[in-house]
């Protein structure tokens, strides 16, 4: 299990960025504007999701067991939704920055298609006794619930009006 901090996660090829963090009643929200990337980050179908001038919106719902990242291009057009199934969404007391414990299993939504990623990492962690069988089953339940929400257009993070956050950086 890895602890992820929103000010550092997925930024290893980013040399410079701006970040704003919002502490809302139900969510922690961060917006990163990528100023300078060493190289573009390209995923399926040759889609670039990280480059100079792109954005990453990250939403951590306080009462859920996932964190959502939305990658946006220079024109703030959504590219990919990426969900980390996680636990223990909280604030780092020293730096006052949102963080969570990543439970390996990820769900993406891209071009109307849902993908489940890193199940091999989850099963390896289970094999190494990082999780009980009950915890493993719960992780799969969270994944199934998340996929159901996406399929039925009911995920509160995906349906959020994020313009006030993304337009304020």
Image (tube, rainbow, N blue to C red):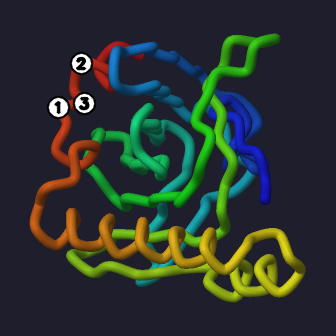
Q: Residue at x 28, y 51 (%)?
A: 78
Q: Is disc 2 surrounded by few (<14), some (14 to 19) or many (20+) residues within 10 Å? A: few
Question: How far apart are the alpha carbons under marks 3 and 1?
Answer: 4 Å
Q: Residue at x 37, y 41 (%)?
A: 74
* Residue in the foreground of this view, choosing between 29 and 26: 26
Does dot 1 land on a helix, a strand or a loop? loop
Question: How far apart are the alpha carbons under marks 1 and 2?
Answer: 7 Å
Residue 93: x %, y % from top left: 75, 13
Give the image quarter of residue 94. Answer: top right
Q: Residue at x 45, y 13 (%)?
A: 23
Check if mark 1's residue and mark 2's residue have beta carbons within 8 Å. Answer: yes
Check if mark 3's residue and mark 1's residue have beta carbons within 8 Å. Answer: yes
**73 lies above or below 90:** below
Does dot 2 land on a helix, a strand or a loop? helix
Residue 72: x %, y % from top left: 37, 47
Check if mark 2's residue and mark 3's residue have beta carbons within 8 Å. Answer: yes
Residue 65: x %, y % from top left: 47, 50
> Which residue carries the number 2 mark?
164
Residue 161, numbered circle: 1
Would you say 50 lies left or right of 9 here? left
Give the image quarter of residue 98. Answer: top right
Does dot 3 land on a helix, a strand or a loop? loop
| Count of picture labels | 3
């Amino acid at each position: 299990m890895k602890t992820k901090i929103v000010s550092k996660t997925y930024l290893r090829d980013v040399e410079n960025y701006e970040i704003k963090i919002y502490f809302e009643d139900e969510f922690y929200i961060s917006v990163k504007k990528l100023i300078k990337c060493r190289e573009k980050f390209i995923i399926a179908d040759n889609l670039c999701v990280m480059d100079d001038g792109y954005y990453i919106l990250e939403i951590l719902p306080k009462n859920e067991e996932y964190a959502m990242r939305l990658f946006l291009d220079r024109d703030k057009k959504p590219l990919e939704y990426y969900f980390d199934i996680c636990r223990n969404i909280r604030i780092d007391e020293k730096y006052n920055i949102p963080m969570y414990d990543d439970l390996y299993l990820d769900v993406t939504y891209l071009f109307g298609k849902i993908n489940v990623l890193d199940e091999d990492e989850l099963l390896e962690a289970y094999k190494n006794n990082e999780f009980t069988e009950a915890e493993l089953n719960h992780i799969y339940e969270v994944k199934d619930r998340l996929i159901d929400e996406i399929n039925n257009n009911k995920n509160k993070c995906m349906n959020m009006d994020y313009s006030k956050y993304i337009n304020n950086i």
